Amino acid sequence: MGSSLAIAQGGSSRRGTGRTTPQPKGAMDTRTKSADKRKAIIVSGFTAIGKSSFSRNTELRRNTNLDVIDLDSCAYSNKPGFPENYLNDIRKAADKPCIVLISTHVGLPTQLAKEGYYVALAYPGGGIDAKQAWLGRLEKREQGGKCSRLYKAMDEQWTLWFERTAKEQVTRKWTLSNDEYLSDIFGSIYADFESFKKRGRKQDGI
């Protein structure tokens, strides 16, 4: 499991005086900016974990009152300026309470977590069984099945993709069993996000 991120702490109050310790210049801005980073749930999801299906499942999210923004990296990765163009749009999307679905491009989840965002990483377990299960998902999903470009790429690059994803340093990690999808674990992600916000408010002195 990933470790929770450290959030910048606010000033403390003097005991017994009823007066607040003067805040260093910029301290309140720091606390505000930290809180701003805790508005959204960013889910960095491995290929074929069910991000698109989750984005359509309004019943699952009815208790969260959060919209889903599915930022497919395919719209960015072939353009000049990647990944910064992708990161910028993720940051803009995460500026309000919502769920942002993103890719697992190397270093991207780690960067967002370092900036203070809540980042949940969802990916398959390791081993040949997981590989076959995920290839099976792509065979059903992709036009062309086993002949599709994505299927062939995963078949050839599975170990690299898995190991690279597992090394990302994020707020929390979830490994999916072979029959699990994002919709199955989102309840746990949401509960962890709420705890993340509470810890942040406590550390900020809010």
Image (spheres, rainbow, N blue to C red):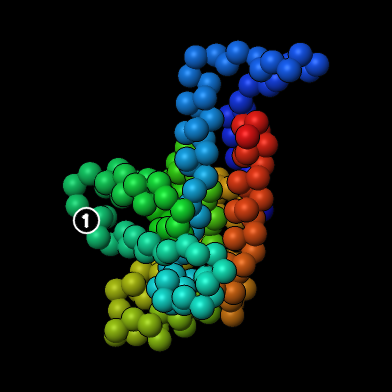
Q: Residue at x 49, y 14 (%)?
A: 25
Q: Nearer the viewer, residue 131 or 42?
A: 42
Which residue appears at 53% of the width and 48% of the height? 118
In this image, 62 relative to 11: left or right? left
Q: Foreground: 47 or 64?
A: 64
User: In the displayed structure, would residue 19 be above or below residue 186?
Assistant: above
- Residue 125 coordinates in the image, percent (x, y): 60, 67
Tell which residue pokes out farthest to the left in this image: 80
- Observer able to see residue 123: no
**Residue 104: which quarter of the image?**
bottom left
Quadrant where the image shows the C terminus: top right
**Neighbour class for label 1 at 10 Å: few (<14), some, many (≥20)?**
few
In which image quadrant can residue 142 be found?
bottom left
Residue 189: x and y, percent? 60, 61
Looking at the rendered structure, the number of numbered marks drawn on it comes to 1
Q: Position of residue 65 (x, y in %)?
A: 50, 64
Vertical side of 79 occupied by 22: above or below: above
Q: Is residue 67 left or right of residue 89?
A: right
Mark 1 belongs to which amino acid? Asn
Q: 37 left or right of 152?
A: right
Residue at image mark 1: 78
Instruction: Say whether residue 200 is visible.
Output: yes
Q: Is residue 36 above or below residue 66?
A: above
- Where is 17 relative to 83, above or below? above
Query: Farthest front residue?
Result: 18
Residue found 60% across the figure and 13% down from its top: 22
Q: Secondary structure at mark 1?
A: loop
- Residue situated in front as seen by the camera: 96 or 165: 96
